[in-house]
């Protein structure tokens, strides 16, 4: 996401990330990844539960789609950072709008099942186009 931060901002988005770790872990993650947007701490998994994010099992490590995602990530120069509070917690990507509107929701089914920047940018463009039509 960091590599596409300016594109998201140009499309009118504000970014934030949510993590399970504590303050020390969040600071280390921010330093290692170089993200400039807010990194929020959800120590009690309240946000994760509210948006109904899933958890993986160790069997997910053997899934073909997970192996392919690991290979793509490694080829792209990505690496796993320290294991956090709950390494089996899966993530998600959301584009929320005013008035409690969900413009885009992607809930990960396994490790490496992430939305693409292109999907997010399309959702932002669709949101902007819908707003322009409503004027």
Image: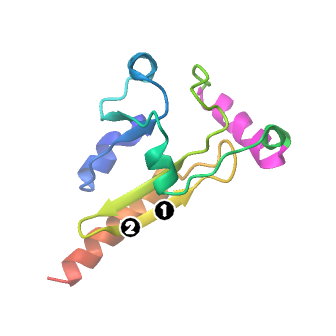
Task: Look at the magenta stretch and give its main secondary structure.
Answer: helix
- Give above or below for 105 relative to 91: below
SS class, disc 2? strand
Seen at 77% across and 42% down, the residue is 57
Give the x, y percent position of residue 37. 30, 35
Seen at 47% across and 37% down, the residue is 44
Residue 68 included in the magenta stretch of the image: yes
Give the x, y percent position of residue 115. 54, 53
In magenta, the rendered stretch is 63-78
**Location of the C terminus (image quadrant):** bottom left
Residue 122, labelled with which disc? Answer: none
Residue 38 lies in quadrant: top left
Instruction: State the residue position of label 2.
Output: 102
Instruction: State the residue position of label 1.
Output: 105
- Give above or below for 20 relative to 91: above
Residue 127 included in the magenta stretch of the image: no
Mark 2 and mark 1 in contact? Answer it, CB < 8 Å: yes
The furthest residue to the front = 44
Left or right of residue 47, residue 59 in this image: right
Left or right of residue 20, residue 74 in this image: right
Q: Residues within 10 Å of mark 2 (few under 14, many from 20)?
A: few
Left or right of residue 89, residue 21 in this image: left
The furthest residue to the bottom = 134
Colour treatment of the image: rainbow
């Amino acid at each position: 996401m960091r590599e596409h931060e300016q594109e998201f901002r140009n499309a009118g988005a504000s970014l934030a990330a949510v993590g399970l770790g504590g303050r020390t872990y969040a600071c280390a993650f921010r330093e290692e990844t170089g993200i400039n947007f807010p990194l929020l701490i959800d120590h009690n998994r309240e946000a994760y539960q509210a948006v109904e994010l899933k958890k993986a099992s160790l069997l997910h490590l053997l899934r073909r789609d997970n192996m392919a995602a690991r290979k793509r990530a490694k080829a792209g120069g990505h690496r796993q950072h320290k294991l956090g509070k709950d390494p089996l917690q899966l993530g998600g990507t959301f584009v929320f709008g005013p008035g409690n509107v969900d413009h885009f929701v992607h809930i990960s089914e396994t490790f490496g099942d992430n939305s693409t920047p292109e999907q997010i940018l399309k959702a932002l463009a669709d949101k902007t186009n819908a707003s322009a039509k409503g004027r």
